[in-house]
Amino acid sequence: MSVNWNWKDKVGTMTVVQSHPGEEDRTFEISLYQGNAFLIMLHEYQEDGQDMYSMYSFFADKQHAKNCLGLNKKQDFGDNFLDTPYNKATKFRINKKKYRYTKDLIALLAEAFDSIDIEIFAEEETA
């Protein structure tokens, strides 16, 4: 099954810092969507005046999120891909009015990270 989302259903953002030896750190924002998955993470940007995007990652369901965040050590998923020396999520900003898994995601993030900023806000959809 393919991952699908609606562009109007953005539920928040994630800030990521990428570090590479000999280079300056690069900070960028990832857009978060819900769609037909637990969480869809897209890098949206402009190139030559055109709106572009690339799939950064996704969590198919809550169990997949646990695996990706390194919270399933019994089945050998002990590494958090969002908390490595080269790629680190530093902040999640979630609209609890639009994202139905807010409580689950926040609990997983709190367990997976020793240090991360989490901002929860409530913004109604505009017509």
Image: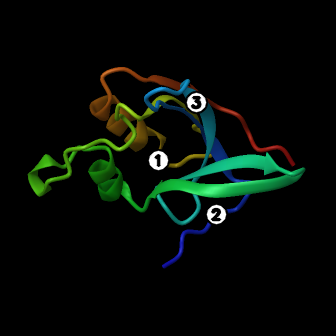
Residue 26 position within the rendered picture, expressed as x and y whole percent measured from the top left: 58, 30
Residue appearing at x 36%, y 20% in the figure: 115
Residue 89 position within the rendered picture, expressed as x and y whole percent measured from the top left: 46, 33
Mark closest to the chain's N terminus, 2 or 1 = 2
The type of residue carrying mark 3 is: Arg
Mark closest to the chain's N terminus, 3 or 1 = 3
Q: Is residue 97 visible?
A: no
The type of residue carrying mark 2 is: Trp
Question: Of helix, strand and loop, which one carries label 3?
Answer: strand
Q: Nearer the viewer, mark 2 or mark 3?
A: 3
Residue 55 position within the rendered picture, expressed as x and y whole percent measured from the top left: 58, 58
- Rendered image quadrant of residue 69: top left
The residue where tag 1 is placed is 101
Q: Residue furthest right?
A: 49
The residue where tag 3 is placed is 26
**Callouts 2 and 1 close, C-beta under 8 Å:** no
Dot 3 alpha-carbon crowd within 10 angstroms: few under 14, some 14 to 19, many 20 or more: few
Residue 40 position within the rendered picture, expressed as x and y whole percent measured from the top left: 54, 55
Residue appearing at x 28%, y 32% in the figure: 111
Q: CA distance from mark 3 to mark 1?
A: 29 Å
Mark closest to the chain's N terminus, 2 or 3 = 2
**Callouts 3 and 1 close, C-beta under 8 Å:** no
Q: Residue furthest front?
A: 22
- What label sits on residue 5 in the rendered view? 2
95 or 83: nearer the eye?
83
Q: Nearer the viewer, mark 3 or mark 1?
A: 3
23 or 36: nearer the eye?
23
Q: Residue furthest bottom?
A: 1
